[in-house]
Amino acid sequence: MTMVRRTGTWLTVPMGDDLLMMSPEQENYVNLNEVGAWIWGLLETPRHLDEICGLLIEEFEVEPAEARATTETFLARLKSLEAVALVPA
């Protein structure tokens, strides 16, 4: 099981359903769509990957395989930006 937690200092600005994230340390920014912004909000406290997927299924009424693929792709992108850490539990 994988634990996901935020890393670095990221400033956020809501933009409708989206979220603009900025890292002053890395001089980097990224725009998150509604689903990404929702997942980022969940990560205010570290969570297990399976928990995030389960909550995504409930909130957006998606199939488990789609929820897993979407979440893993999104978290891999955030990891590449050093916005999250994926830690084996």
Image: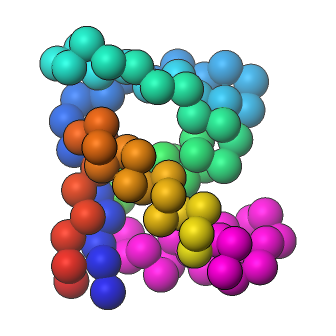
Give the total number of marks visible in the rendering: 0
Q: Position of residue 5 (x, y in %)?
A: 28, 58
Q: Is residue 48 left or right of residue 25?
A: right
Query: Which quadrant holds the N terminus?
Result: bottom left
Q: Is residue 23 left or right of residue 54?
A: left
Q: Is residue 79 left or right of residue 13?
A: left
Farthest right residue in view: 61
Q: Residue at x 42, y 74 (%)?
A: 49
The image's colour scheme reads rainbow
Q: Position of residue 42 (x, y in %)?
A: 49, 56
Placement of 76 over or under 66, stated as above or below: above
- Most common secondary structure along the magenta stretch: helix
Placement of 64 over or under 20, stated as above or below: below
Front one among 3 and 68: 68
Q: Which residues are magenta?
A: 47-67
Q: Is residue 62 magenta?
A: yes
Q: Is residue 67 visible?
A: yes
Q: Position of residue 33 (x, y in %)?
A: 66, 37
Q: Position of residue 68 (x, y in %)?
A: 57, 74
Placement of 6 over or under 12, stated as above or below: below
Q: Is residue 42 visible?
A: no
Q: Residue at x 52, y 70 (%)?
A: 52
Occupied quadrant, residue 89: bottom left
